[in-house]
């Protein structure tokens, strides 16, 4: 394990989450396996890759996460990794199975997480499965209804605070460092990212190494985790390359993209991020250094999309490809369309857009989509159906 900030090194230790010397983020470095082949792996889902996930897990906390569909787009040379098919409807479940398994095996009784929504839903579900008490800290009136309802249903203690996600995250980190009795499940915990890197393994097993992978960026852990997965495949001698990693931020919450554009080494954070994509409404991404590492070492970039572009992409995913996602998920597709038009992505490239969460996470955003809604009397239904038939035949 190595601190990304000061270079402090330590032996692999599941109790070590942040640097004891400077408080920076820790990276987990995996030793290359000799003569490794994915054909050796058995089972399904995230824990199919147990051989590639460091740590000791005598008791697993799992809900069957992973094995999400990789769907080819009707248009373009593009695939969608549909992470909304995970048990609680988002990619967070991949990391949560590893992090909560660690918490349980280390003897913790309470787990906690700050959240824009998906982390709270996942933490609550996996905490319940493990028999642990779960406390989630949410920005008041800033979490989509579907996600808040999940946390409540799974029995978490919900703490709503005035302010944004960054305020909630600071509270979690402070509690962890001061007491040590509560296990944090946010992505500054490097063990959680070990679960999320399995997205890369699944993509590789289906289509090999794509040219480009596009990832919505909020707290910036997932883009690093996916890059790390491909990087480790190369280290194990399974592949010879990694894809270009492209992060996509909403324009109103885009400190990393702005820093990339200005070629700044350190982003200027924002205290008031605003976007309809609530899952990535984060002004101070804790994993920014890891995200920058992934992007720079893969020759990628971080771009922005507007809320209108996000909503248009959300509708296109649903009405052209039959895929229902929340707005943050649609950011990756919106970024693909924008960069394709700008010729930063070539139409001949093989690309994968990560769709991070299910549409039912944010029902209010779906209601913004224009649709044909007809109110009729019972005796008029047949006439409406006949009209639709005539319209369909003429088109």
Image: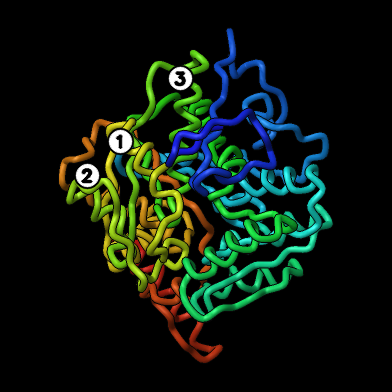
How packed is label 1: few (under 14 Cα within 10 Å), some, or many (20 or more)? Answer: some
Q: Which residue is mark 1?
A: 296
Residue 180 to residue 26: above or below: below
Q: Is residue 44 left or right of residue 225?
A: right
How packed is label 3: few (under 14 Cα within 10 Å), some, or many (20 or more)? Answer: some
Residue 49, given in percent of the width and then of the height, sits at 65, 29
Q: Nearer the viewer, residue 236 or 199?
A: 236
Disc 2, SS: helix
Q: How is the image coloured?
A: rainbow
Give me the residue at 35% from left, 73% from top.
Answer: 272
Disc 3, SS: helix
Proximity of marks 1 and 3: CB atoms separated by less than 8 Å: no
Q: CA distance from mark 2 to mark 3?
A: 27 Å
Residue 312, given in percent of the width and then of the height, sits at 31, 63
Give me the residue at 36% from left, 37% from top.
Answer: 293
Residue 198 to residue 129: above or below: above
Q: Which residue is mark 2?
A: 340
When asked about the image quadrant of residue 274, the answer is: bottom left
Q: Which residue is mark 3?
A: 234
Q: CA distance from mark 1 to mark 3?
A: 17 Å
How packed is label 2: few (under 14 Cα within 10 Å), some, or many (20 or more)? Answer: some
Residue 100, given in percent of the width and then of the height, sits at 72, 49
Give me the residue at 73% from left, 43% from top.
Answer: 102
Q: CA distance from mark 2 to mark 1?
A: 20 Å
Q: Is residue 184 left or right of residue 248?
A: right
Q: Is residue 360 visible?
A: no
């Amino acid at each position: 394990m190595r601190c990304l900030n000061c270079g402090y090194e330590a032996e692999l230790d599941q109790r070590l989450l942040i640097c004891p010397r400077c408080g920076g983020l820790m990276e987990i470095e995996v030793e290359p396996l000799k003569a490794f082949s994915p054909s050796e792996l058995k089972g399904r889902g995230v824990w199919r890759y147990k051989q590639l996930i460091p740590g000791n897990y005598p008791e697993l906390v799992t809900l069957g996460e992973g094995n999400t569909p990789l769907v080819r787009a009707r248009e373009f040379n593009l695939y969608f990794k549909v992470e909304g098919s995970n048990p609680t409807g988002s990619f967070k479940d991949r990391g949560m199975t590893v992090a909560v398994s660690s918490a349980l095996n280390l003897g913790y009784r309470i787990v906690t997480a700050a959240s824009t929504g998906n982390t709270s839903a996942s933490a609550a579900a996996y905490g319940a499965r493990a028999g642990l008490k779960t406390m989630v800290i949410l920005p008041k009136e800033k979490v989509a209804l579907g996600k808040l309802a999940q946390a409540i249903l799974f029995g978490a203690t919900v703490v709503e605070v005035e302010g944004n996600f960054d305020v909630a995250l600071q509270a979690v980190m402070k509690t962890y460092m001061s007491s040590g009795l509560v296990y944090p499940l946010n992505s500054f915990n490097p063990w959680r990212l070990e679960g999320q890197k399995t997205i890369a393994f699944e993509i590789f097993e289906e289509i090999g190494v794509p040219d480009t992978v596009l990832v919505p960026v909020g707290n910036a852990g997932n883009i690093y985790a996916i890059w790390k997965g491909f990087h480790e495949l190369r280290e194990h001698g399974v592949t010879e390359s990694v894809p270009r990693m492209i992060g996509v931020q909403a324009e109103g919450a885009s400190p990393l993209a702005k820093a990339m554009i200005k070629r700044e080494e350190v982003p200027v954070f924002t205290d008031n991020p605003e976007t309809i994509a609530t899952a990535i409404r984060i002004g101070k991404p804790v994993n920014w250094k890891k995200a920058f590492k992934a992007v720079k070492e893969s020759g990628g970039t971080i771009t922005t999309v507007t809320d209108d572009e996000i909503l248009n992409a959300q509708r296109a995913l649903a009405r052209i490809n039959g895929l229902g996602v929340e707005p943050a998920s649609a950011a990756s597709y919106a970024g693909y369309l924008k960069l394709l038009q700008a010729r930063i992505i070539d139409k001949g490239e093989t690309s994968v857009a990560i769709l991070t969460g299910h549409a039912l996470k944010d029902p209010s955003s779906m209601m913004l989509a224009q649709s044909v809604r007809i109110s009729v009397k019972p005796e008029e239904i047949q006439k409406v159906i006949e009209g639709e038939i005539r319209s369909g035949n003429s088109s």
